[in-house]
Image (cartoon, helix red, strand yellow):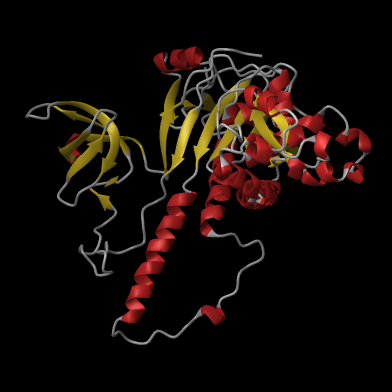
């Protein structure tokens, strides 16, 4: 399972330790809990430490989820794994709501607001807030993890697929294009474009074969514009038939297929934009950055017979991937970006008018919404122990969202904070029992 981070009395990072060793340090009083997420111990006494091993952080940036792994290059052991679940869609929705409220306000008889759009300029490297949040989430976690372990290098998947090398083999050497990676680069592009499903029957979660939309026997080329993905049954049934003949009874499928074949990957282009921003910001942190493509990641993962997961993809990014990647018993930490509250002073009705009073103080009796607390209620109808995320109320009686239900009306005096709100919610992923 994932190792436990350890820092010394001056909060300098030491070697991560096995959970069993961490329990021993806690039971002997040699360490105390510093952080819950990721779980980190701080030593209370001086203990003999071996040489501190250099570690590499590896990133697989994505539109909705980014895979993250910390790996020991020398041993191939995965020390820590996590998946960052972004909130770009929530930010976009909030901006749309704000735009609607402001637009409706302009139609009412209110004072004139002079347009300021002509006075605003975008800085170099500007990204829309929904995209910038993805980059900020990753950089935040790289900085946090640097404080608890000895990170000396980084690897990231810079592009999903190298279209230049796919279209122009000579751009970086004919051997690169026609070598082992050729099929992986093209296949990664097709998986992204066709949503990892058979274009004819829409079947998923089964082996897919590269298929020519216009058959080679009828003059079709090997250009990526003429390639799609099909399951073995559909590919065999189609054979050398034209797609219009094969799907003669399904004209709507033909229309959709031909339209999608011409559609560029706008989402992938947006993700690639954030990848370059992430690359620049990682370099600014002072860590050496190794880059790799999605095709290389898939090649590394397939060679090592590892399953498809975001954090496992992160383990396989770049040429530095060890021949043996040890992922046995690793449980990834799922970190969902929740934000730090909202600036809006009050909630609005569907007509654009305030429907609540101004929001109250963010902190009540030393507690804040989003804190993870343990409440021990000793008497009354709600007696028991509850652990979960807190929602504060100005009257001092809070709500606690546990895994089972939301418990309302818990007095602040019965609560104890075990993790302060940091903009993320946490849960454990599924245990990975195999290794390669």
In the image: residue 257, left or right of residue 84: right
- Residue 92 percent location from the top left of the image: 46, 56
- Residue 12 percent location from the top left of the image: 58, 33
Does the rendering let one see residue 288?
Answer: no
* Up/down of 96 relative to 44, above or below: below
Locate residue 219: give its quadrant. Answer: top right
Query: Which quarter of the figure is the C terminus placed in?
Result: top right
* Up/down of 183 relative to 63, above or below: above
Q: Which residue is at the front of the view, 416 or 300?
A: 300
Q: Which residue is at the front of the view, 135 or 199?
A: 199
Residue positioned 37% across, 40% down in the render: 420
In the image: residue 26, left or right of residue 108: right
Residue positioned 61% across, 26% down in the render: 312
* Up/down of 124 relative to 103, above or below: above
- Residue 410 percent location from the top left of the image: 16, 37
Locate residue 349: give its quadrant. Answer: bottom left
In the image: residue 207, left or right of residue 11: right
């Amino acid at each position: 399972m994932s190792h436990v981070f350890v820092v010394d009395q001056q909060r300098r990072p030491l070697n991560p330790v096995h959970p069993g060793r961490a329990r021993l340090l806690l039971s002997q009083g040699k360490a105390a809990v510093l952080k819950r997420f990721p779980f980190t111990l701080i030593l209370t006494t001086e203990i003999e430490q071996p040489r501190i091993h250099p570690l590499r952080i590896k990133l697989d940036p994505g539109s909705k989820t980014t895979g993250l792994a910390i790996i020991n290059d020398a041993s191939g052991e995965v020390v820590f794994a996590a998946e960052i679940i972004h909130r770009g869609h929530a930010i976009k929705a909030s901006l749309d709501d704000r735009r609607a409220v402001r637009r409706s306000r302009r139609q009412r008889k209110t004072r004139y607001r002079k347009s300021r759009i002509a006075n605003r300029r975008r800085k170099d490297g500007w990204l829309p807030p929904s995209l910038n949040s993805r980059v900020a989430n990753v950089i935040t976690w790289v900085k946090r993890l640097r404080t608890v372990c000895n990170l000396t290098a980084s690897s990231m998947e810079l592009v999903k697929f190298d279209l230049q090398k796919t279209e122009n083999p000579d751009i970086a050497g004919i051997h690169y294009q026609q070598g082992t990676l050729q099929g992986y680069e093209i296949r990664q592009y097709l998986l992204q474009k066709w949503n990892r499903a058979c274009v004819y029957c829409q079947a998923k979660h089964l082996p897919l074969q590269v298929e020519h939309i216009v058959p080679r026997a009828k003059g079709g080329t090997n250009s990526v514009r003429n390639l799609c993905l099909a399951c073995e049954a559909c590919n065999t049934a189609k054979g050398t038939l034209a797609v219009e003949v094969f799907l003669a009874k399904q004209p709507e499928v033909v229309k959709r297929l031909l339209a999608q074949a011409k559609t560029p990957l706008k989402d992938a282009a947006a993700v690639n934009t954030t990848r370059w921003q992430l690359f620049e910001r990682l370099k600014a942190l002072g860590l050496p950055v190794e880059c790799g493509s999605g095709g290389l990641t898939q090649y590394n993962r397939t060679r090592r017979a590892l399953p498809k997961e975001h954090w496992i993809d992160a383990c396989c990014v770049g040429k530095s991937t060890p021949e043996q990647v040890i992922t046995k018993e690793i449980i990834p930490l799922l970190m969902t970006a929740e934000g730090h509250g909202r600036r809006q002073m009050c909630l609005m009705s569907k007509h654009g008018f305030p429907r609540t009073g101004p929001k109250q103080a963010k902190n009540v009796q030393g507690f804040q919404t989003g804190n993870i607390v343990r409440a021990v209620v000793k008497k009354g109808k709600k007696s028991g122990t509850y652990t979960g995320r807190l929602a504060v109320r100005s009257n001092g009686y809070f709500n606690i969202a546990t895994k089972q239900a939301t418990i309302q009306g818990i007095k602040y005096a019965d609560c104890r904070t075990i993790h302060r709100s940091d903009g993320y919610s946490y849960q454990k992923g599924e245990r990975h029992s195999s290794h390669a």
